[in-house]
Amino acid sequence: MISLAPIIDVLATKPDGFAEIWFRRIDGVAEGEQIKTEAMPMPACWIMRESEKSDHAGSYAELVTVTFNVVIGVECHRQHREPNAADEMMLRYRTAVKNRLLGFDWPDEHANKVNYAGGKLLAYGKGYLYWMDTYTVRALVTSYKPDPDAAGTRIERIIDNDHLL
């Protein structure tokens, strides 16, 4: 139950010193589906929620681990004359995104920093390369109701020096 909008926002601005053209489109996966591949402005980036795992943390509280994916798409058919050039270009984009997200402070006061969980090739061909990196974030999610279990129980122990256990 955590919005992924902050991820889109943090990736919207080109990092200082990044030499390539920054993403012409950064969006949720549903918005990217509405555009034909050949009409997609490349390079592009899509953010999609993969899963949420919840651990009970009180009567009105859950410790939620959100797994989300960052899909990066680049053109790779015209300008690449050097060996492995497409892979090197994708690596530069992936590194820039990873540097932006690792340690990102989620706006929610009870959320951990973003962690990297791995990546994989999605597709390669027809002049495009698509890669997906997976990240996780954990947050304590509560309802608007006061939690009767909060005093001296798991909720107080979950938050330890601004880190979720």
Image (cartoon, rainbow, N blue to C red):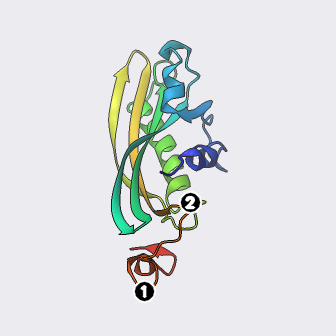
98 to 147, vertically: above or below: above
Q: Nearer the viewer, residue 125 or 59?
A: 59
Q: Secondary structure at mark 1?
A: loop
Horizontal side of 23 relative to 153 (left or right) equals right
Q: According to the image, label 2 marks what residue?
A: 106
Q: According to the image, label 1 marks what residue?
A: 152
Taking the spot 56% from the left edge, 59% from the top edge, the residue there is 106
Q: Earlier in the sequence, mark 2 or mark 1?
A: 2
Taking the spot 55% from the left edge, 29% from the top edge, the residue there is 43
Q: Position of residue 102 (x, y in %)?
A: 49, 58
Taking the spot 44% from the left edge, 32% from the top edge, the residue there is 85
Q: Residue furthest bottom?
A: 152
Taking the spot 41% from the left edge, 27% from the top edge, the residue there is 129
Give the residue type that dot 1 points to.
Gly
91 to 43, vertically: above or below: below
Q: Position of residue 96 (x, y in %)?
A: 53, 48
Q: Position of residue 101 (x, y in %)?
A: 52, 54
Horizontal side of 84 relative to 75 (left or right) equals left
Q: CA distance from mark 2 to mark 1?
A: 26 Å
43 to 62, vertically: above or below: above
Callout 2: few (<14), some (14-19), or many (20+) C-alpha neighbours within 10 Å?
A: some
Image quarter (top left, top right, bottom left or bottom right) of the C terminus: bottom left
Contact, mark 2 vs mark 1 (Cβ under 8 Å): no
Q: Position of residue 47 (x, y in %)?
A: 49, 39
Give the residue type that dot 2 points to.
Trp
Callout 1: few (<14), some (14-19), or many (20+) C-alpha neighbours within 10 Å?
A: few
Q: Nearer the viewer, residue 36 or 21?
A: 36
* Number of the front mark, 2 or 1: 1
